[in-house]
Amino acid sequence: MADNAPSTPDPQPLKEAVRAARIEAAERTGVVVDMRDADVARLELLNEALDPLFKEIPDSIDLFERGISRGETPRLWLDVVAHVAMGRDKRMYRFVQDTRYGRTTIAESYEIPALVRAITRYVASRLVERERALAEGPREEAPVDAPLTVTRRRRWGKFRAFLLGLVVGVIALFVLAMINPH
């Protein structure tokens, strides 16, 4: 008989490929985490640059809740509807506001001072909106039971239509019975 190959097993190509893919995925995950950490660090720098602005706002005004969320996309929240996130190139700051018509970009910049100016204008406009709302006073609204009254009217209208149909139907049957004495 001929000499067989050595008794060491052949390397398993699929097993090695899966191992290599796992290592590559782990390295990519590390890169993503590093990029997210870099985004958070840039947002923290902006947050520190905003400290003097937010110190000027009186404590009695509770419009703004500043903080950094560290989710999949880190954001520096200024209030409930406005935040700063990093742009696609991870160096540009994007200041956006959620409106009832969708998300609006207020400012974009690579530089912190330019963004601080845009945020200062935004804070000032929110404070003016608050002053106007307080100056107008409370709105006069319809009484709380008004919707119930409208609902009752609708129900009563439906009930009257039902009764009318019932009465007309009974009269029609009575007339039909009188015409047809059979």
Image: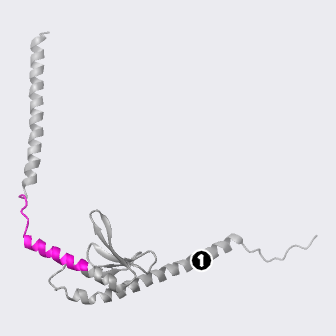
Quadrant (top left, top right, bottom left, bottom right) of the N terminus: bottom right
Q: Residue at x 66, y 72 (%)?
A: 17
Q: Examine the structure image and report whether residue 75 is included in the region drawn in magenta.
A: no
Q: Position of residue 131 (x, y in %)?
A: 12, 76
Q: Residue at x 20, y 79 (%)?
A: 124
Magenta-drawn segment: 121-143
Task: Please name whichever residue, 101 or 154, is drawn nearer the observer in this view of the structure.
Answer: 101
Question: Circle 1 — which element?
Answer: helix
The correct choice, above or below, for 2 with respect to 93 in the image is above
Amino acid type at circle 1 is: Glu
Residue that lies at the very extreme toward the top in this rendered image = 182
Q: Examine the structure image and report whether residue 137 is included in the region drawn in magenta.
A: yes
Q: Residue at x 33, y 86 (%)?
A: 113
The correct choice, above or below, for 4 with respect to 164 in the image is below
Q: Is residue 123 visible?
A: yes
Q: Residue at x 8, y 65 (%)?
A: 139
Quadrant (top left, top right, bottom left, bottom right) of the C terminus: top left
